[in-house]
Amino acid sequence: MKLHSTFYILLSTTIIALCSLTASAADYSPAVITFSDGTVLPCELRLIGARPLTMVPIGDNRQKKFHLKDIISIDHITESATMKRPWVFKESGRAEKVYLEGEYPLLNFKTRVTLVNGNEITGHIISVALSYKTDAGKRKIFMTRQIKGTKEQTLNDILHVCNIRMTDNAVEGGGAITGSVEGFGNIISVTALDNEREQVLFAEVKADGDFDFGTVLPGSYDLCVLTDTHVLCGLSDETPANRKGDALQAGDLAGIKKKFPMADDFFNDRWILKLQGHRRFAKALVYKRRQDYYEAEKWTPGGFLWHLEVWSWHLADTEWKIDLRSILIRHKQKGGEKNRKLMIGKSLDAVLPGQSLHIKSGDKNNETWTFIRDLD
């Protein structure tokens, strides 16, 4: 199938020339791409690089990341399309502009992602490179929030992606994760580590202290609750489906702790508190703190900054290597604020969509929870 001739003009901005990829055929998924000139292109598609498709939802300041296997469709929607006059600053360091002759097309986009759990999320995409292949070969496509044309082009000359439909993906459902906390102080925040996708989700905490993650994707989630007196955390053996491996053995924790101080970090004080998973994907629960940080004394005299994180590792031959760091809690503790007690509980391990949790203290000895340490 031949594409519009302007497709080749656009190679310098959003569509990149033919390339050779080393990825295997298994990395590609069936898709249909629709372009702005009406061209419909059946193909196989994959993301280039390790980063998932990333966007900032409208009204939110947190990035969200999406794997193609979780996506039904991507709509790239034109927010504005105007002809602009080129300009330069009249003088370096001053705001006054000098407008030049001619005009160039400028398009801005927002992106709507429809997920397999039925959720639709609209926002502004972080530039992403994809590879697609047809019988004619392989090409790259570069999706951006903005396209700036040349003075030789009009708005109609700018070819761009309007829609990508992942034809093998189907609505799977998923479900909500909700809950409440009793006997552990006032709830401040709740996060969840998506064990399949290695992403951290943030729950809405309601006025009555209940929390709600909304409808999440299929999979399992380790939860972490921050209150004014405690941190309650789950850390299961669940890992991404394609990263299963041999069970952890005696000496593995010591091997990770040996490499742990070598990892670059802004925190000098840090500890591995617990290790789960297996040798191809080990999950280390990490506590980090620092007394001195930018403007610390300006608003938290006597306080400190601390993180609770999960670091994922894998065993390469005889050496442990770090893969990813996921921040469950980032807390700026003020002077005089009470130190939290970190507790581990099975009820927060590998929570499934559709569950409603009632997190409460056990009997007087709290036998359903394991005390790890004071976060001091």
Image (tube, grey):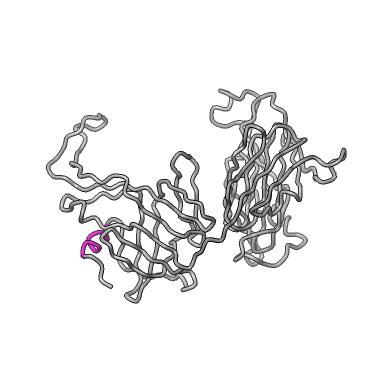
Q: 344 left or right of 11? A: right
| x then y, percent, for residue 338 | 72, 28
Residue drawn at (25%, 30%) of the image: 95
| x then y, percent, for residue 375 | 72, 36
Residue drawn at (37%, 58%) of the image: 163
Closer to us: 317 or 24:
24
Q: 337 left or right of 99? A: right
Task: Establish if 318 lies above or below 105.
Answer: below
- Residue bounds of the magenta highlight: 5-12
Residue drawn at (39%, 61%) of the image: 164
Residue 9 in magenta stretch: yes
Magenta region, mostly helix, strand or loop? helix
Closer to us: 157 or 274:
157
Numbered label tally? 0
Closer to us: 195 or 270:
195
Closer to us: 177 or 273:
177
Answer with the quarter of the image where residue 196 lies: bottom right
Farthest residue to the bottom: give it: 135
Residue 238 in magenta stretch: no
| x then y, percent, for residue 145 | 35, 48
Farthest residue to the left: give it: 101
Quadrant that contains the N terminus? bottom left
Quadrant that contains the C terminus? top right
| x then y, percent, for residue 252 | 72, 59
